[in-house]
Image (cartoon, rainbow, N blue to C red):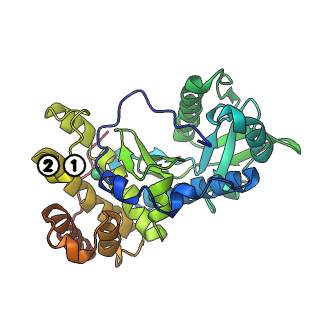
Amino acid sequence: MLRMHLPASLAPLLRTCFALLLTALAIGANGAASAGTPAMGRFEQLRGQDLRVARVTYRLAIANQAQCAAVLTPQLGFVLHRLEQYGPADRQEAAHSFGLGVHVGVMAVVGDSPADRAGLLPGDQLLSINGHDLGEPAANGDQSRRSLDRAEQILVEHMRRGAVTLRVSSASGEREIHFVAERGCPSNVEFIPGDEVNAWADGKRVMISDGLLGRCATDDDLALVIGHEMAHNLLHHRQRLAAQGASANTMLPAAAASAEIRAAEEEADRLAVGLATAAAYDLSGAEVFIGRLMGQSNVAAATHPDLSRRLSLLRAAIADVRRGGEPGVIPKG
Ligand SMILES: [Zn+2]
């Protein structure tokens, strides 16, 4: 695998969201995409995927400031990475391609974000924020996840207080970047390279796989997927299901899912519609997209009670939210 996924300490609970299609879709064209691709091509492709996920996430987060008023969080507007995230065989090439050294690096910058307007560039390495060091260089893969989290935490803490000065280095030397971060919905979304076709939420973070990203033909599709997973976290579904005794070990297929899990999925779909609509994404193709994504045609969906129900609720939610209906209340953090 090009870049390792370094899981957060808590096991993901809501892994059923889009995982039904695993066996049906794992053999799609995407699985072969990275094999035999020249290294620079693979790395540039990875940067493009990271940027696509970050761009849609950022737009959802910013456009829903009112909806997330109780939990507003500074939005980085850029994607961080570390050299230790890459497999040993790819590390030298990754260092060269991305300008990565011992520091946290900037993988991608969302266009027209404050950081972008201030001149932050992909390939910059972050040295400090407001004079504060961004943490120790990672010693190994496991620590790199924590050191990346730590660096993000320090950045957010400073951005929460107001204007920030980032000291960065690149091939052309060191410089300073000044900006004030936008605030938006908490939205820690991570792109996972590899063959899996899924997206899931662990309570704080959202993961979206390469396989699923490839099946989102448009950013409208992607906004629905990311919005759904953000909704699980915003609505505290992980904690609620844990309190109700739904365990991470009972990853039931939708047909057998408990009423609690199904209710959480339906709430997440509805809030996703609200988040995507507020961000001006076009959901006119949402029903067809979800129907296809779940590995079935709309005709087959009519005979599949769970998918049929999901699609019909989705259609109703889109119509209702367009009329100004409440997509869900986001509780205080
Ligand atoms: Zn879900």
Above or below for 10 versus 203: above
Which picture quadrant has residue 151? top right
Asked whether mark 2 and ligand 1 are closer than 8 Å, the reply comes as no
Q: Position of residue 297 (x, y in %)?
A: 28, 74
Residue that appears at 23% across and 57% down: 328
Q: Is 178 placed left or right of 285 in the picture?
A: right
Q: Position of residue 67 (x, y in %)?
A: 33, 57
Q: Position of residue 272 (x, y in %)?
A: 32, 60
Find residue 29 and name its label.
none
Q: Position of residue 300 (x, y in %)?
A: 21, 73
Q: Residues within 10 Å of mark 1 (few under 14, many from 20)?
A: few
Above or below for 104 versus 188: above
| Cβ–Cβ under 8 Å for marks 2 and 1 | yes
Which amino acid is tagged 1?
Pro
Dot 1: element: loop
Residue that numbered label 1 is attached to: 253
Whether residue 127 is visible to the viewer of this picture, yes or no, is no
Which picture quadrant has residue 237? top left
Of 233 and 27, which appears nearest the observer? 27
Q: Is 8 placed left or right of 310 in the picture?
A: right
Residue that numbered label 2 is attached to: 256
Which amino acid is tagged 2?
Ala
Which picture quadrant has residue 252? top left
The residues bearing labels 2 and 1 have C-alpha atoms spaced at a distance of: 6 Å
Of 98 and 253, which appears nearest the observer? 253
Residue that appears at 45% across and 65% down: 216
Residue that appears at 42% across and 63% down: 223
